[in-house]
Amino acid sequence: MRKFITFALAGTALALAGASSALAQTQLRIFTGGQQRPDVMRQILEGYMAKNPGVKVEVEVGGATSEQQQQYLNTVLASRDSSLDVVLIDVIRPAQWAAAQWAEPLDSYLGADKDATMARYLPAYREANIVDGKVIALPYFADAQFLYYRKDLFEKYGVQPPKTWAELKDASKKIQDGEKNPNLSLFQTAGAPIEGTVCTYLVPLWQLGGNLTDKNGKLSLSADIAKKPFELWGDLKAAGVLPTNIAEIVTDRMRQNYQAGQLVSTMNWGFVWNRVENDADSQVKGKTGVVPMPAYEAGKSATCIGGWQLAVTAFSKNKAEAVKLIRYLSSPEVSKQQAILASHLPVFPDVYTDADVLKANPWFKDALPVVQTARSRPVTPRYNEVSEIIRTNMNSFLAGTKTADAALADMQSKLGTIFK
Ligand code: GLC
Protein backbone atom coordinates (compact mmCIF):
# COMPACT_ATOMS: atom_id res chain seq x y z
CA MET A 1 0.00 0.00 0.00
CA ARG A 2 2.71 2.37 1.05
CA LYS A 3 4.58 1.50 -2.09
CA PHE A 4 1.49 2.27 -4.13
CA ILE A 5 1.06 5.68 -2.48
CA THR A 6 4.70 6.51 -3.11
CA PHE A 7 4.27 5.59 -6.76
CA ALA A 8 1.06 7.55 -7.07
CA LEU A 9 2.68 10.61 -5.51
CA ALA A 10 5.72 10.31 -7.72
CA GLY A 11 3.40 10.00 -10.72
CA THR A 12 1.52 13.15 -9.73
CA ALA A 13 4.78 15.04 -9.24
CA LEU A 14 5.96 13.96 -12.69
CA ALA A 15 2.65 14.96 -14.26
CA LEU A 16 2.87 18.37 -12.57
CA ALA A 17 6.44 18.85 -13.71
CA GLY A 18 5.34 17.95 -17.23
CA ALA A 19 2.49 20.44 -17.12
CA SER A 20 4.65 23.26 -15.83
CA SER A 21 7.32 22.67 -18.49
CA ALA A 22 4.57 22.65 -21.13
CA LEU A 23 3.44 26.00 -19.78
CA ALA A 24 6.99 27.34 -19.88
CA GLN A 25 7.32 26.48 -23.57
CA THR A 26 7.59 29.34 -25.98
CA GLN A 27 6.07 28.66 -29.39
CA LEU A 28 7.68 30.45 -32.28
CA ARG A 29 6.58 30.42 -35.89
CA ILE A 30 8.92 31.14 -38.76
CA PHE A 31 7.88 31.80 -42.35
CA THR A 32 10.03 30.73 -45.30
CA GLY A 33 9.63 30.21 -49.03
CA GLY A 34 9.64 26.84 -50.74
CA GLN A 35 12.83 27.54 -52.67
CA GLN A 36 14.77 28.43 -49.51
CA ARG A 37 14.95 24.81 -48.34
CA PRO A 38 12.45 24.52 -45.48
CA ASP A 39 13.69 20.94 -44.99
CA VAL A 40 17.15 22.22 -44.18
CA MET A 41 15.73 24.90 -41.91
CA ARG A 42 13.80 22.23 -40.01
CA GLN A 43 16.96 20.22 -39.55
CA ILE A 44 18.78 23.27 -38.19
CA LEU A 45 15.86 24.03 -35.89
CA GLU A 46 15.92 20.49 -34.49
CA GLY A 47 19.40 21.28 -33.24
CA TYR A 48 18.24 24.57 -31.75
CA MET A 49 15.27 22.99 -29.96
CA ALA A 50 17.46 20.23 -28.56
CA LYS A 51 19.66 22.90 -26.98
CA ASN A 52 16.69 25.05 -25.96
CA PRO A 53 14.04 22.66 -24.64
CA GLY A 54 11.80 25.56 -23.58
CA VAL A 55 11.33 26.67 -27.18
CA LYS A 56 9.33 25.05 -29.94
CA VAL A 57 9.67 26.41 -33.46
CA GLU A 58 7.22 25.71 -36.25
CA VAL A 59 7.97 26.34 -39.89
CA GLU A 60 5.39 27.79 -42.25
CA VAL A 61 6.14 27.48 -45.96
CA GLY A 62 4.54 29.63 -48.63
CA GLY A 63 5.05 31.17 -52.03
CA ALA A 64 7.16 29.70 -54.82
CA THR A 65 8.76 33.03 -55.72
CA SER A 66 9.95 36.08 -53.82
CA GLU A 67 7.13 38.41 -54.93
CA GLN A 68 4.46 35.77 -54.23
CA GLN A 69 5.75 35.40 -50.69
CA GLN A 70 5.70 39.13 -50.16
CA GLN A 71 2.15 39.42 -51.52
CA TYR A 72 0.98 36.97 -48.89
CA LEU A 73 3.01 38.70 -46.18
CA ASN A 74 1.57 42.10 -47.14
CA THR A 75 -1.86 40.78 -46.14
CA VAL A 76 -0.73 39.10 -42.93
CA LEU A 77 1.31 42.06 -41.73
CA ALA A 78 -1.04 44.81 -42.82
CA SER A 79 -3.58 43.22 -40.50
CA ARG A 80 -0.97 43.29 -37.69
CA ASP A 81 -1.38 39.55 -37.28
CA SER A 82 0.81 38.12 -34.54
CA SER A 83 0.95 34.53 -35.79
CA LEU A 84 4.40 34.93 -37.36
CA ASP A 85 7.37 35.66 -35.12
CA VAL A 86 10.16 35.41 -37.67
CA VAL A 87 10.05 35.90 -41.43
CA LEU A 88 12.66 35.14 -44.04
CA ILE A 89 12.78 38.14 -46.36
CA ASP A 90 14.57 38.72 -49.64
CA VAL A 91 17.57 41.08 -49.57
CA ILE A 92 15.55 43.64 -51.57
CA ARG A 93 12.97 44.12 -48.79
CA PRO A 94 14.45 45.63 -45.61
CA ALA A 95 13.71 49.21 -46.77
CA GLN A 96 10.04 48.37 -47.33
CA TRP A 97 9.82 46.47 -44.06
CA ALA A 98 11.39 49.37 -42.19
CA ALA A 99 9.06 51.94 -43.75
CA ALA A 100 5.98 49.81 -43.05
CA GLN A 101 7.21 49.16 -39.49
CA TRP A 102 6.71 45.44 -39.91
CA ALA A 103 10.12 44.52 -38.54
CA GLU A 104 11.08 44.91 -34.91
CA PRO A 105 14.33 46.94 -34.94
CA LEU A 106 17.02 44.78 -33.41
CA ASP A 107 19.36 47.45 -32.04
CA SER A 108 18.22 47.35 -28.44
CA TYR A 109 18.34 43.53 -28.39
CA LEU A 110 21.86 43.44 -29.80
CA GLY A 111 22.86 46.13 -27.30
CA ALA A 112 26.59 46.52 -26.83
CA ASP A 113 27.17 43.65 -29.31
CA LYS A 114 25.57 45.50 -32.19
CA ASP A 115 28.63 46.82 -34.01
CA ALA A 116 30.70 43.69 -33.45
CA THR A 117 27.83 41.48 -34.62
CA MET A 118 27.21 43.46 -37.77
CA ALA A 119 30.92 43.82 -38.57
CA ARG A 120 31.29 40.07 -39.08
CA TYR A 121 29.01 39.92 -42.12
CA LEU A 122 30.02 40.59 -45.71
CA PRO A 123 29.59 44.37 -46.15
CA ALA A 124 26.72 44.09 -48.64
CA TYR A 125 24.59 42.21 -46.10
CA ARG A 126 25.52 44.51 -43.24
CA GLU A 127 24.44 47.46 -45.39
CA ALA A 128 21.28 45.86 -46.75
CA ASN A 129 19.99 45.11 -43.27
CA ILE A 130 20.63 48.50 -41.69
CA VAL A 131 18.02 51.06 -42.75
CA ASP A 132 18.30 54.64 -41.47
CA GLY A 133 20.72 53.47 -38.81
CA LYS A 134 18.45 50.70 -37.51
CA VAL A 135 19.10 46.97 -37.80
CA ILE A 136 16.00 45.61 -39.50
CA ALA A 137 17.02 41.97 -39.99
CA LEU A 138 20.02 39.63 -39.77
CA PRO A 139 21.39 37.77 -42.80
CA TYR A 140 20.55 34.07 -43.16
CA PHE A 141 22.32 33.31 -46.44
CA ALA A 142 23.97 35.17 -49.31
CA ASP A 143 23.23 34.73 -52.99
CA ALA A 144 24.30 35.79 -56.46
CA GLN A 145 23.66 34.62 -60.00
CA PHE A 146 26.04 32.29 -61.76
CA LEU A 147 26.13 30.40 -65.02
CA TYR A 148 25.45 26.71 -64.45
CA TYR A 149 26.53 24.71 -67.46
CA ARG A 150 26.80 21.09 -68.56
CA LYS A 151 30.53 20.49 -68.21
CA ASP A 152 30.23 17.09 -69.91
CA LEU A 153 28.63 18.56 -73.04
CA PHE A 154 31.03 21.47 -73.23
CA GLU A 155 33.94 19.05 -72.98
CA LYS A 156 32.42 16.69 -75.53
CA TYR A 157 32.34 19.49 -78.12
CA GLY A 158 35.64 21.04 -77.05
CA VAL A 159 34.17 24.35 -75.96
CA GLN A 160 35.27 26.45 -73.01
CA PRO A 161 32.74 27.82 -70.53
CA PRO A 162 31.60 31.10 -72.11
CA LYS A 163 32.94 34.41 -70.86
CA THR A 164 30.88 36.47 -73.29
CA TRP A 165 27.33 36.38 -74.62
CA ALA A 166 28.73 35.74 -78.09
CA GLU A 167 30.64 32.71 -76.78
CA LEU A 168 27.49 31.47 -75.05
CA LYS A 169 25.61 31.70 -78.32
CA ASP A 170 28.35 29.88 -80.28
CA ALA A 171 28.79 27.17 -77.67
CA SER A 172 25.02 26.59 -77.46
CA LYS A 173 24.77 26.25 -81.24
CA LYS A 174 27.69 23.87 -81.42
CA ILE A 175 26.20 21.63 -78.74
CA GLN A 176 22.79 21.73 -80.39
CA ASP A 177 24.22 20.82 -83.80
CA GLY A 178 26.05 17.89 -82.27
CA GLU A 179 23.33 16.59 -79.96
CA LYS A 180 20.45 17.02 -82.42
CA ASN A 181 18.06 16.65 -79.49
CA PRO A 182 14.86 18.70 -79.94
CA ASN A 183 14.11 18.38 -76.21
CA LEU A 184 17.40 19.95 -75.19
CA SER A 185 16.92 23.62 -74.36
CA LEU A 186 20.11 25.68 -74.70
CA PHE A 187 20.00 28.51 -72.17
CA GLN A 188 17.43 29.87 -69.72
CA THR A 189 17.15 32.88 -67.48
CA ALA A 190 14.04 34.05 -65.62
CA GLY A 191 11.49 35.49 -68.08
CA ALA A 192 8.12 35.13 -66.33
CA PRO A 193 6.83 38.27 -64.57
CA ILE A 194 8.66 37.30 -61.35
CA GLU A 195 11.32 38.98 -59.21
CA GLY A 196 14.18 37.13 -60.91
CA THR A 197 13.25 38.79 -64.21
CA VAL A 198 14.26 42.16 -62.74
CA CYS A 199 17.80 40.75 -62.73
CA THR A 200 17.37 39.51 -66.29
CA TYR A 201 17.02 43.18 -67.21
CA LEU A 202 19.59 44.68 -64.82
CA VAL A 203 22.52 42.29 -65.34
CA PRO A 204 23.24 43.27 -68.98
CA LEU A 205 22.52 46.92 -68.17
CA TRP A 206 25.15 46.91 -65.43
CA GLN A 207 27.63 45.02 -67.59
CA LEU A 208 27.50 47.89 -70.06
CA GLY A 209 28.12 50.45 -67.33
CA GLY A 210 24.47 51.51 -67.15
CA ASN A 211 22.43 51.98 -64.00
CA LEU A 212 18.82 52.56 -63.09
CA THR A 213 19.47 55.66 -61.01
CA ASP A 214 22.26 58.24 -60.71
CA LYS A 215 24.03 59.10 -57.50
CA ASN A 216 21.23 61.50 -56.53
CA GLY A 217 18.68 58.72 -56.83
CA LYS A 218 17.16 60.10 -60.06
CA LEU A 219 16.19 57.79 -62.91
CA SER A 220 19.10 57.50 -65.32
CA LEU A 221 17.84 55.07 -67.93
CA SER A 222 19.33 56.71 -70.99
CA ALA A 223 17.78 55.32 -74.13
CA ASP A 224 20.91 53.88 -75.68
CA ILE A 225 22.17 51.58 -72.97
CA ALA A 226 18.72 50.96 -71.48
CA LYS A 227 17.59 49.28 -74.69
CA LYS A 228 20.56 46.91 -74.88
CA PRO A 229 19.21 44.26 -72.46
CA PHE A 230 16.10 43.92 -74.64
CA GLU A 231 18.31 43.58 -77.70
CA LEU A 232 20.52 40.97 -76.07
CA TRP A 233 17.65 38.71 -74.99
CA GLY A 234 15.72 39.37 -78.19
CA ASP A 235 18.72 38.28 -80.22
CA LEU A 236 19.26 35.11 -78.15
CA LYS A 237 15.58 34.25 -78.47
CA ALA A 238 15.61 34.81 -82.24
CA ALA A 239 18.69 32.58 -82.49
CA GLY A 240 16.90 29.80 -80.59
CA VAL A 241 19.32 29.98 -77.67
CA LEU A 242 16.53 31.12 -75.34
CA PRO A 243 13.44 28.89 -75.63
CA THR A 244 10.28 30.15 -77.32
CA ASN A 245 8.44 29.94 -73.97
CA ILE A 246 11.03 32.06 -72.15
CA ALA A 247 8.24 34.40 -70.95
CA GLU A 248 6.86 31.55 -68.83
CA ILE A 249 10.11 30.52 -67.21
CA VAL A 250 10.46 30.86 -63.42
CA THR A 251 13.55 30.21 -61.31
CA ASP A 252 12.79 26.77 -59.98
CA ARG A 253 11.52 25.58 -63.34
CA MET A 254 14.99 26.25 -64.79
CA ARG A 255 16.46 24.18 -61.98
CA GLN A 256 14.04 21.35 -62.76
CA ASN A 257 14.73 21.49 -66.50
CA TYR A 258 18.45 21.49 -65.89
CA GLN A 259 18.26 18.67 -63.37
CA ALA A 260 16.20 16.58 -65.79
CA GLY A 261 19.03 16.86 -68.32
CA GLN A 262 16.94 19.04 -70.65
CA LEU A 263 18.88 22.28 -70.41
CA VAL A 264 22.51 23.03 -71.33
CA SER A 265 23.02 26.17 -69.25
CA THR A 266 21.14 28.52 -66.94
CA MET A 267 21.62 31.84 -65.19
CA ASN A 268 20.69 30.83 -61.69
CA TRP A 269 21.25 31.17 -57.94
CA GLY A 270 23.28 29.26 -55.34
CA PHE A 271 20.62 26.78 -54.24
CA VAL A 272 20.64 24.98 -57.59
CA TRP A 273 23.98 23.24 -57.01
CA ASN A 274 22.91 21.20 -54.01
CA ARG A 275 19.70 20.05 -55.68
CA VAL A 276 21.49 19.08 -58.89
CA GLU A 277 24.22 17.15 -57.09
CA ASN A 278 22.05 15.48 -54.45
CA ASP A 279 18.42 15.06 -55.51
CA ALA A 280 17.55 11.44 -56.22
CA ASP A 281 15.96 12.37 -59.55
CA SER A 282 18.92 14.39 -60.85
CA GLN A 283 20.11 13.20 -64.26
CA VAL A 284 23.19 15.41 -64.23
CA LYS A 285 25.09 14.60 -61.03
CA GLY A 286 28.79 15.37 -61.42
CA LYS A 287 28.23 16.98 -64.81
CA THR A 288 27.93 20.62 -63.81
CA GLY A 289 30.29 23.58 -63.89
CA VAL A 290 29.55 26.92 -62.23
CA VAL A 291 31.20 30.13 -63.47
CA PRO A 292 30.53 33.88 -63.34
CA MET A 293 27.85 35.18 -65.71
CA PRO A 294 28.93 35.80 -69.31
CA ALA A 295 29.25 39.46 -70.25
CA TYR A 296 29.56 41.64 -73.35
CA GLU A 297 33.30 41.76 -72.86
CA ALA A 298 35.33 39.11 -71.04
CA GLY A 299 35.99 40.17 -67.47
CA LYS A 300 33.08 42.62 -67.27
CA SER A 301 30.59 40.31 -65.64
CA ALA A 302 27.89 41.50 -63.28
CA THR A 303 25.23 39.83 -61.21
CA CYS A 304 22.42 40.74 -58.84
CA ILE A 305 23.14 40.33 -55.20
CA GLY A 306 20.54 38.07 -53.66
CA GLY A 307 20.00 36.37 -50.35
CA TRP A 308 17.59 35.96 -47.48
CA GLN A 309 17.34 37.76 -44.15
CA LEU A 310 15.70 36.99 -40.83
CA ALA A 311 13.30 39.63 -39.52
CA VAL A 312 11.36 39.52 -36.25
CA THR A 313 7.87 40.87 -36.87
CA ALA A 314 6.74 43.94 -34.96
CA PHE A 315 3.61 41.99 -34.00
CA SER A 316 5.30 38.94 -32.48
CA LYS A 317 4.32 38.19 -28.88
CA ASN A 318 7.70 36.55 -28.22
CA LYS A 319 10.20 39.08 -29.48
CA ALA A 320 13.03 38.36 -27.07
CA GLU A 321 12.95 34.61 -27.82
CA ALA A 322 12.56 35.31 -31.53
CA VAL A 323 15.66 37.52 -31.52
CA LYS A 324 17.59 34.82 -29.69
CA LEU A 325 16.56 32.37 -32.40
CA ILE A 326 17.55 34.60 -35.32
CA ARG A 327 20.92 35.34 -33.75
CA TYR A 328 21.52 31.63 -33.78
CA LEU A 329 20.23 31.19 -37.34
CA SER A 330 22.50 34.04 -38.42
CA SER A 331 25.65 32.50 -36.89
CA PRO A 332 28.78 31.17 -38.66
CA GLU A 333 27.86 27.70 -37.40
CA VAL A 334 24.48 27.76 -39.19
CA SER A 335 25.98 29.46 -42.23
CA LYS A 336 28.32 26.49 -42.55
CA GLN A 337 25.50 24.01 -42.06
CA GLN A 338 23.42 25.70 -44.77
CA ALA A 339 26.39 25.78 -47.13
CA ILE A 340 26.85 22.04 -46.76
CA LEU A 341 23.19 21.02 -46.73
CA ALA A 342 21.81 23.45 -49.31
CA SER A 343 24.71 25.21 -51.13
CA HIS A 344 23.46 28.45 -49.62
CA LEU A 345 26.26 30.96 -49.99
CA PRO A 346 27.76 32.09 -46.67
CA VAL A 347 27.35 35.60 -45.27
CA PHE A 348 30.71 35.30 -43.46
CA PRO A 349 33.89 35.48 -45.59
CA ASP A 350 35.67 32.76 -43.56
CA VAL A 351 33.04 30.12 -44.22
CA TYR A 352 33.91 30.17 -47.96
CA THR A 353 37.29 28.60 -47.21
CA ASP A 354 36.09 25.99 -44.71
CA ALA A 355 37.27 22.54 -45.85
CA ASP A 356 33.89 20.81 -45.32
CA VAL A 357 32.10 23.59 -47.16
CA LEU A 358 34.50 23.33 -50.11
CA LYS A 359 34.14 19.59 -50.19
CA ALA A 360 30.37 19.95 -50.68
CA ASN A 361 30.70 22.93 -53.03
CA PRO A 362 34.09 23.02 -54.80
CA TRP A 363 33.00 26.09 -56.82
CA PHE A 364 32.69 28.18 -53.64
CA LYS A 365 36.46 28.70 -53.89
CA ASP A 366 35.78 31.23 -56.67
CA ALA A 367 32.37 32.41 -55.46
CA LEU A 368 33.35 34.97 -52.83
CA PRO A 369 34.59 37.65 -55.29
CA VAL A 370 31.37 37.21 -57.30
CA VAL A 371 29.26 37.82 -54.19
CA GLN A 372 31.52 40.69 -53.12
CA THR A 373 31.12 42.51 -56.43
CA ALA A 374 27.45 41.66 -57.01
CA ARG A 375 25.24 44.71 -57.40
CA SER A 376 22.11 45.55 -55.48
CA ARG A 377 18.77 46.18 -57.02
CA PRO A 378 17.45 49.68 -56.21
CA VAL A 379 17.07 50.25 -52.47
CA THR A 380 13.71 51.92 -51.86
CA PRO A 381 10.60 51.36 -49.73
CA ARG A 382 8.72 51.34 -53.06
CA TYR A 383 10.70 48.37 -54.35
CA ASN A 384 7.49 46.36 -54.96
CA GLU A 385 6.41 48.87 -57.57
CA VAL A 386 9.86 49.19 -59.10
CA SER A 387 10.10 45.44 -59.44
CA GLU A 388 6.68 45.14 -61.01
CA ILE A 389 7.40 47.83 -63.61
CA ILE A 390 10.65 46.20 -64.70
CA ARG A 391 9.58 42.56 -64.62
CA THR A 392 6.25 43.03 -66.41
CA ASN A 393 7.85 45.04 -69.21
CA MET A 394 10.73 42.61 -69.61
CA ASN A 395 8.19 39.79 -69.62
CA SER A 396 5.93 41.43 -72.25
CA PHE A 397 8.94 41.95 -74.47
CA LEU A 398 10.02 38.31 -74.10
CA ALA A 399 6.46 37.17 -74.77
CA GLY A 400 6.47 39.21 -77.96
CA THR A 401 3.51 41.36 -76.91
CA LYS A 402 5.54 44.60 -76.60
CA THR A 403 8.42 45.98 -78.64
CA ALA A 404 11.63 46.99 -76.91
CA ASP A 405 10.77 50.66 -77.53
CA ALA A 406 7.31 50.34 -76.02
CA ALA A 407 8.57 48.37 -73.01
CA LEU A 408 11.35 50.86 -72.39
CA ALA A 409 9.06 53.89 -72.77
CA ASP A 410 6.66 52.40 -70.22
CA MET A 411 9.52 51.70 -67.83
CA GLN A 412 10.91 55.19 -68.21
CA SER A 413 7.62 56.93 -67.61
CA LYS A 414 6.55 54.81 -64.63
CA LEU A 415 9.96 54.59 -62.96
CA GLY A 416 10.40 58.32 -63.57
CA THR A 417 7.59 59.09 -61.13
CA ILE A 418 9.30 57.01 -58.44
CA PHE A 419 12.94 58.07 -58.92
CA LYS A 420 12.50 61.82 -59.39
C1 GLC B 1 17.05 34.21 -55.22
C2 GLC B 1 17.76 35.37 -54.57
C3 GLC B 1 16.81 36.52 -54.31
C4 GLC B 1 16.14 36.87 -55.61
C5 GLC B 1 15.41 35.68 -56.16
C6 GLC B 1 14.81 36.00 -57.51
O1 GLC B 1 16.19 33.61 -54.29
O2 GLC B 1 18.37 34.99 -53.36
O3 GLC B 1 17.49 37.63 -53.79
O4 GLC B 1 15.29 37.97 -55.48
O5 GLC B 1 16.29 34.60 -56.32
O6 GLC B 1 14.29 34.88 -58.13
Image (tube, grey):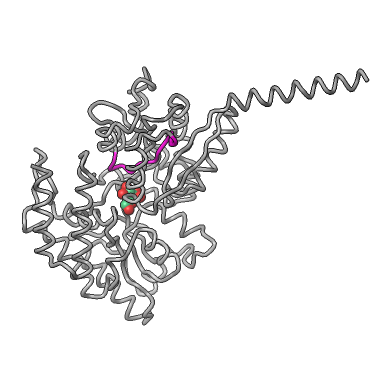
The quadrant in which residue 85 appears is: top left
Provide residue 240's location: percent of width, then percent of height: 26, 75
| Image quadrant in which the N terminus is located | top right
Residue closest to the eye, 312 or 137 = 312
Over which residues does the magenta segment extend? 83-93
349 magenta-colored: no
Q: Is residue 162 above or below residue 349?
A: below
Provide residue 58's location: percent of width, then percent of height: 52, 39
| Image quadrant in which the C terminus is located | top left
Provide residue 28's location: percent of width, then percent of height: 49, 33
Residue closest to the eye, 283 or 378 = 378
The residue at 8%/52% (across/down) is 413
Is residue 219 visible in the rendered image? The answer is yes
Residue closest to the eye, 266 or 289 = 266
The quadrant in which residue 133 appears is: top left
Residue ranking furthest to the left: 223
In the image, is 272 to the left or to the right of 418? right
In the image, is 30 to the left or to the right of 46? left
Q: Is residue 58 above or below residue 408?
A: above
Q: Is residue 325 above or below residue 410?
A: above
Residue closest to the eye, 30 or 188 = 30
The residue at 49%/68% (across/down) is 283
Provide residue 384's location: percent of width, then percent of height: 24, 46
Residue ranking furthest to the front: 79
Is residue 367 visible in the rendered image? The answer is no
Q: Is residue 239 above or below residue 285?
A: below
Residue ranking furthest to the right: 1
In the image, is 387 to the left or to the right of 65? left
